[in-house]
Amino acid sequence: MFEEATQYTPGGVNSPARTFRAVGGTPFFVDRAEGAYVYDLDGNPYVDYVGTWGPAILGHAHPKIVKAVQEKAALGTSFGIPNPLEVTMAKRVCEAVPSVEKVRMVNSGTEATMSAIRLARGYTNRDKIIKFEGCYHGHVDSLLVKAGSGALTVGSPNSAGVPAAFTEHTVVLPFNDEEAVKQAFETYKGEIAGIILEPVPANSGLYPPKPGYLDSLREITRREGALLIFDEVMTGFRLAWGGAQEVFGVSPDLSCFGKIIGGGLPVGAFGGRDDIMDQTSPTGPVYQAGTLSGNPLAMAAGITALEELRSGEAYQQLEKSGAKLEEGILDAAKQVGLPVQINRLGSMFCLFFTDSPVRNFNDATKSDRDRFAKFFHGMLDRGVYLAPSQFETGFLSTAHKDDEEIEKTIRVVREVFKEL
Ligand code: KE4
């Protein structure tokens, strides 16, 4: 199947993040997925920690999500006309994320961040945008500079095909370094439209912001008249009902969402302060549009997923399971004297083969990627699927049960660590 795929699609994949180039071998093909498992074409089950890169927080083929999509599909798959589901979704996001007073649905995280930075530039009438090394905001031309995720894993963090003119207004700084941000605002006084960041970078490995770092970004952008944009495509509704901004208590001016709010269907969204969002077409001069934006199927799947997450119980379960998995892996590493660091927030985790802490992109690139590749295949051979790259984050779902999948994963990790 892979041979055939490579004849019709570059690298045989529809997204480079799925290639096995960083770990060797070829991707398996999925036939179906259910709960915590994906099944390959031969029916082999794998405990899945990729979770379709974040959306599957409730596990795969959740009965309520499947039912909602089936019912709505029978009533029409897309209208291009306002429908009530879009209003319900917008209300849910605004209710969950206090800093969001208005929200616009789009069809991917890339569209969300692309639109958010255009809006920031339109609102402030300034051109420069600050991003951080290793952060990935989708494949937006002007943000494909020292980007993470697949750009870091398989390509060059600076993609070909992006004219220098498209990135001359992109200022790239190291993450977790307040001084660097201060310098940039001095160098480009009055020119910076905004800062866009993953509040918890998870596309070059996973590492949390230093205590007070997000507050310092909030403070300097407010003082300098620039906008603070949180790219919560991954962390939104993942780390908490209100996302990373709830966890860290920092309110950005604009936020980007994706993944979970689509329940596994194509989705993205950007939202924020009323006065900023009203600058978006048709109420303002910043143009943005999309044929399938707010389509009924993605809305039905997303609303159903959010309904299951709203009580907050899922996040308590995910924290408990994440802590159990982290403890089990670190204990297994200690048993065999393997240098392993685990960075984890709730149900997001990343394992690095290095004996020093990983606090930023630079630290992450020092980890032993050959050992990671061996680990990846050792786990895969034993029925546990991790992201095929050191620079991606693992995701737990509510379908990963402590006494089943978590226990099994820890057992398998013990076996594989012995081989490393
Ligand atoms: P999409 O355009 O892929 O829906 O979203 C882009 C995006 C934006 N912002 C953040 C923080 C993201 O993590 C992403 C996409 N994440 C990657 C996984 N690290 C998607 C996987 C892929 O590209 O196939």
Image (cartoon, rainbow, N blue to C red):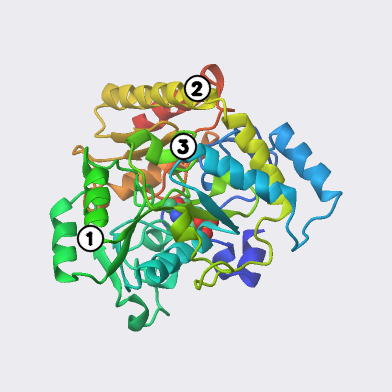
Residue located 34% across and 24% down the image: 332
Tell us which disc is closer to us: 3 or 2: 3
Q: Quadrant of the N terminus?
A: bottom right
Q: Residue furthest top?
A: 403
- Pick the front one: 329 or 123: 123
Q: Circle 2 sits in a helix, a strand or a loop, which is it?
A: helix
Label 1 environment density (alpha carbons within 10 Å; few <14, some 14–19, many ≥20): some
In the image, residue 289 sits, relative to residue 29, either above or below, namely below
Q: Where is mark 3, residue-wise?
A: 242
Q: Quadrant of the C terminus?
A: top left
Q: Where is mark 2, residue-wise?
A: 317
Q: Which of the 4 quarters of the picture holds residue 302?
A: top right
- Residue 265 at x, y percent in the picture: 65, 50
Q: Where is mark 1, residue-wise?
A: 224
Q: Earlier in the sequence, mark 1 or mark 2?
A: 1
Q: Amino acid at mark 2?
A: Gln
